Image (spheres, helix red, strand yellow):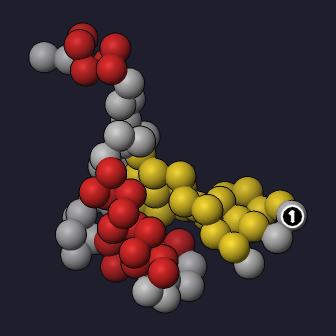
Amino acid sequence: MKVQLVTNPAGDANFRMAAERLLDDGAMNPAQLQRMLRSQYPSATVFGGIQEAGSERWYVYREGRWIDSSPAADMTAG
């Protein structure tokens, strides 16, 4: 089954690429991907998600939870 990763924060290209690389290197399920990611991102959390039409979506959170990464959120923070 093909796996599609949905990463958060969406704007962190390095995190997305790390998760995709580990998936390509053989992560077989969300728990295994999470263990592998935590060597570099200690709070990373991965959840399995929707399965449809031969693919599955996994949700990958760098901070262990969803964070607002929109430009508007950046402007109001701090």
For the C terminus, the quadrant is top left
Query: Of residues 45 and 55, which is closer to you in this image?
Result: 55
For the N terminus, the quadrant is bottom right
Q: Position of residue 51 (x, y in %)?
A: 78, 63
Q: Residue at x 23, y 64 (%)?
A: 42
Q: Position of residue 70 (x, y in %)?
A: 38, 24
Q: Position of residue 15 (x, y in %)?
A: 31, 57
Q: Could you tell me the amino acid type at mark 1?
A: Ala
Tell me: 31 left or right of 70. Answer: right
Is residue 35 visible in the rendered structure shown here?
A: no
Q: Residue at x 49, y 88 (%)?
A: 26
Figure quadrant of residue 39: bottom left
- Which residue corresponds to mark 1? 53
Query: Of residues 47 and 8, which is closer to you in this image?
Result: 8
Vertical position of residue 76 compared to residue 54: above or below: above
Query: How many neighbours does mark 1 have within 10 angstroms: few (below 14), some (14-19), or many (20 or more)?
Result: few
Q: Residue at x 45, y 51 (%)?
A: 7
Is residue 61 visible in the rendered structure shown here?
A: yes
Vertical position of residue 11 compared to residue 70: above or below: below
